[in-house]
Image (spheres, rainbow, N blue to C red):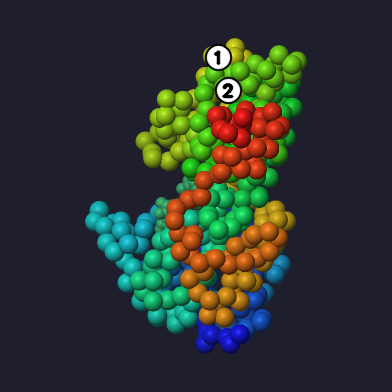
Amino acid sequence: MALAQIGRIGVLTSGGDCAGLNAVIRAVTARAVNHYGLQVYGILDGTLGLMERPLRYVELAPSTFDGRIFREGGTVLGTTNKGDPFRFPMADGSVRDRSQDFGDGVRELGLDALVVIGGDGSMSIVSRLCHAVGVGMVGVPKTIDNDVHGTDFSIGHATAVGVVTDAMDRLQPTAASHHRVMIVEVMGRDAGYIAMQGGIAGGADVVLVPEIPYSMDGVATAIRKVLDRGRTHALVVVAEGVKRDDGTVVHLPASTRYGGIGHWLGERIADTTHTETRVTILGHVQRGGSPSPQDRLLASAFGVHAVDLVMRGQLDRMVAWRNLSVVDVPLSEVTIGARPLDPNGTLATTAHGLGIYIGDTEAAG
Ligand SMILES: Nc1ncnc2c1ncn2[C@@H]1O[C@H](COP(=O)(O)OP(=O)(O)OP(=O)(O)O)[C@@H](O)[C@H]1O
Ligand SMILES: O=P(O)(O)OC[C@H]1O[C@](O)(CO)[C@@H](O)[C@@H]1O
Ligand SMILES: [Mg+2]
């Protein structure tokens, strides 16, 4: 296939950070420079680096990443998950469309294409931006939430599930020693992938996710069953986006961000089962740390394939992982919102098969 006329590309990270971002930037840089002889500019702080003046970017070389950085969490480029460029909140309180600043930045730097490493929100926002200013992009899915359509896995998810599993391994002995019910609140926005996978891997007795309705009766019965069988402790995983049983959302104080359902649930479980409960909110611990081997492999395959797509002129696509292979999908199939966990899919069926209470779904019979 003929190669597109590309000399310089930009790469940026956007949305919440996660483990494995540096490994993607490393793979993009290695493939672009070593194989195609391109120049790679790393844009700082997501879309902001191209919107602000002076422009904020660094030229990347494979040697930057070879030793240490690809093993580390976070993103050396920085990122942002606020300030929609189409409705950018200005210092004077007004809101401005700053998409043309972004376009001017792309032109000023002479970028022939952009590799955008982001979650569902970033894929939507940045692909709209790229269309508006006439530059091609290839997306690389990352998010601990795993809620990007079109790919089995997004970068950062496996590491986050590892953090949850490790936390459960640490909580089980202390729960057992004190005969307590431990509640672990995990991230995921409106998607239950982290909770369901962490719950299965970490030996939970109850897993609550936003996609599956539950009842306090169901939760209490499940815990009582565990206790009646002779085990004197239980483990509960709840996703941050789960609502109270009356359907109301639990937010952090004075915020629209999720957080706190674990404490609400802990009190209700203590009341209904007459057990002692303790609550752990894992929070941003799930986003940090060294990427797992799976995330490093995914990041490497995604980075290489993203550059190959750019060079073949196959833009407006996102790299993806399906059935043991790296593939790519049109961005239009991805930018349709966040992907929910299938309430009747393999994860739900497996959890139910293990005897975990997951709420009221067909998978739960
Ligand atoms: N490039 C960006 N500039 C400004 N805001 C952004 C950008 N990308 C995402 N956002 C905002 O960040 C918030 C988080 O969005 P979303 O969760 O969809 O991010 P994401 O890119 O999917 O990453 P993650 O899910 O890992 O946080 C949303 O309010 C979204 O509008
Ligand atoms: O970094 P912030 O703004 O607290 O965002 C937290 C959110 O980002 C994520 O970590 C990733 O989307 C969610 O799981 C969580 O709700
Ligand atoms: Mg997201």
| 1 and 2 marks in contact (CB < 8 Å) | yes
Residue ID for mark 2: 219
Could you tell me if residue 17 is visible in this image? no
The residue type indicated by label 2 comes to Val
Q: Nearer the viewer, residue 313 or 239?
A: 313
Mark 1 sits on what residue?
A: 272
**What number is the disc on residue 129?**
none
- Residue 329, x across and y down, in percent: 55, 66
Among the two numbered marks 1 and 2 on one chain, the one whose residue lies closer to the N terminus: 2
In terms of depth relative to the viewer, which is nearer, 104 or 123?
Answer: 123
Which residue appears at 55% of the width and 48% of the height?
145
Q: Given this view, does label 1 or label 2 mark the residue nearer the observer?
A: 2
Q: How far apart, in angstroms, are the residues tagged by discs 1 and 2?
A: 9 Å
* Number of marks in the rendered image: 2
Report x, y in % for residue 42.
52, 71
Q: Nearer the viewer, residue 108 or 186?
A: 186
Residue type pointed to by label 1: Thr
